[in-house]
Amino acid sequence: MIDTCGSDEGWNDHRWSGPRPRRLYVEGNGPMLHQHCLRCGRDFIRDQSSNRRFAVFVSAISFHQLNRRVTARWLRERCPGERPPSDDADRKERVAEFFVSEDERTHLDSRRVA
């Protein structure tokens, strides 16, 4: 994964979809925690080994990691309270795709760079 900042500046302003993040395994990387904000629709994953957070676009079977600029801004900004139209363009700024599983045994090294 691309090394990205882990700022807490705007993190606690979000309204998360559940009391605990969803635990998943990213192929080739291991355990990750996924969080989705109900107000703004932004998604993040946190690498449990490094504790780094990344902005992501969620598809049916994978996460698309967004570039450093988007991740840094989304982590820094307070929750906008609704889904901003500008986030649609941000979600197109993909740098890598990571396939996920809820089973620890299935994470293989099959990352695809976008």
Image: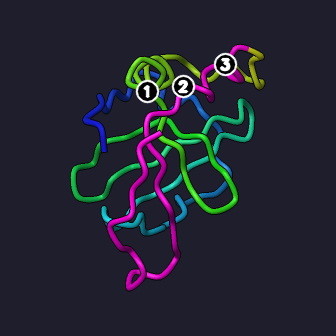
Mark 1 touches mark 3? (CB < 8 Å): no
Please state the horizontal and vertical placement of residue 58, each as a whole percent of the image.
63, 48
Callout 2 touching callout 3 (CB < 8 Å): yes
Q: Which residue is mark 2?
A: 93
Q: Along the horizontal axis of the image, is 30 left or right of 21? A: left
Looking at the image, do the residues carrying marks 1 and 2 touch, with CB atoms under 8 Å apart? yes
**Which range is magenta?**
86-114
Residue at left 56%, top 28%?
13
Mark 1 and mark 2: span between their CA atoms?
6 Å
Farthest residue in the left direction? Answer: 50
Mark on residue 94? none
Helix, strand or loop under label 2: loop
Q: Position of residue 81 (x, y in %)?
A: 73, 23
What residue does disc 3 label?
89
Residue at point 48%, 21% (across, down): 70
Return the residue nearer the eye: 45 or 111. Answer: 111
Foreground pick, 50 / 58: 58
Name which residue lies at 62% across and 27% down: 92
Mark before the other along the chain sequence, 1 or 3: 1
**Which of the 4 quarters of the picture holds residue 14?**
top right
Residue 74 image point, x, y percent? 51, 23
What amino acid does circle 2 point to?
Glu
